[in-house]
Amino acid sequence: MTRQTLTAPPRTSASTEPLRTRLEIVPTEEIVPAIATTVPQGTALTVTCLPHHGIEATAQAAVRLAGLGYSVVPHLAARSIADRSRLAKTLRDFESAGIEEVFAISGDAARPAGPYATSLDLMEDIADLTGGRLAIGIAGYPEGHPQRTAVELLDSLLAKQHLAANVVTQMCFSAPAITAFAALLRQEGLDLPVWAGVPGRVPRARLISLAAKIGVGPSLKFISRKGPLARRLLSGDAYSSERLIGELSVSRAGLAGIHLFTFNNLGLV
């Protein structure tokens, strides 16, 4: 495979430094060698934890990537962890590999596999088992969640902030929605760095399919309406977040950086 170089978002006149970018990948069998041949060492990567993969696939990929010189943030889905001893072993493996941060989510499994029903349950044990040595990221929802009210989401963030290092937003296609969400958190006294979750360059058909599955909010309701956003997303063979990243880089709004959902399309980032 030919080595490619990923480039940072273009500089803008309103910012002296581009926003930092980290890449989210799915732990498939082929992803580690693909990253090794296309992504520069030292790049920040996050590794998802999906119900059908379980935490084993995430842990194995994260440890291997850390060993190759990448800065890795593994996802841990509370509902996919069978017991505290399994969590403890996973955290020991992470620390031995030099991993310094994890991302805690409740997960999409219908029933908890063990004692962790929520991300807060999981975060409390992570902090206890590591003595607070591992930083913990948590999820934020600029456009809401189909199963929880806005008040419930905000209360959940406030309840977790004492254990959290940062907030990563759900994939969003609107710079105003992301910046308004970051401002709301600050107004409510939640002073954590916010990573803006945006899609990388992804084939249009795959984007539409994924958006329907993960419940992206109003900024992607382009299927049933017309307008500038619809024209940008539905034109050509692939969606590009270059304009969105540019808008976020100009406004900045206290953002820590860009969390780029690659869908494992490394050549299209």
Image (cartoon, rainbow, N blue to C red):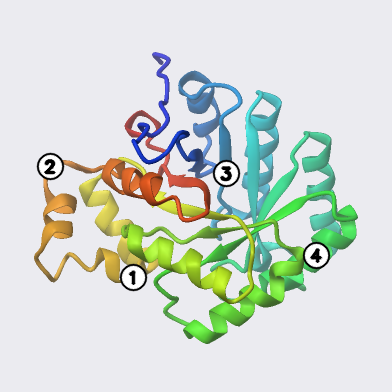
Residue 265 is at least partly visible in this image: yes
**Amino acid on which the number 4 mark rests in the picture:** Asp
The mark found on residue 83 in the picture is 4
How far apart marks 3 and 2 lie (CA) works out to: 28 Å
Could you say which quadrant of the image residue 103 lies in?
A: bottom right
Q: Secondary structure at mark 3?
A: strand
The answer to whether the residue labelled 3 contacts the one labelled 4, judged by CB atoms less than 8 Å apart, is: no
Q: Secondary structure at mark 4?
A: loop
**Amino acid on which the number 1 mark rests in the picture:** Gly
**Amino acid on which the number 3 mark rests in the picture:** Thr
Image location of residue 68, percent across then percent down: 65, 23
Q: Secondary structure at mark 1?
A: loop
Which quadrant of the rendered structure holds the N terminus? Answer: top left
- Sequence-wise, the earlier of marks 3 and 1 is 3
How far apart marks 1 and 2 lie (CA) works out to: 22 Å
- Sequence-wise, the earlier of marks 2 and 4 is 4
Drawn side of residue 95 relative to residue 109, left or right: right
Vertical placement of residue 192 versus 98, above or below: below
Image point 84% across, 49% down: which residue?
133
How far apart marks 1 and 4 lie (CA) works out to: 33 Å
Image location of residue 256, percent across then percent down: 55, 48
- Sequence-wise, the earlier of marks 3 and 4 is 3
Could you say which quadrant of the image residue 165 lies in?
A: bottom right
How far apart marks 3 and 1 lie (CA) works out to: 23 Å
Residue reaching furthest to the top: 2
The mark found on residue 46 in the picture is 3
How far apart marks 3 and 4 lie (CA) works out to: 23 Å
- Sequence-wise, the earlier of marks 1 and 4 is 4
- Sequence-wise, the earlier of marks 1 and 2 is 1
Q: Secondary structure at mark 2?
A: loop
Residue tagged by mark 1?
Answer: 217
The mark found on residue 236 in the picture is 2
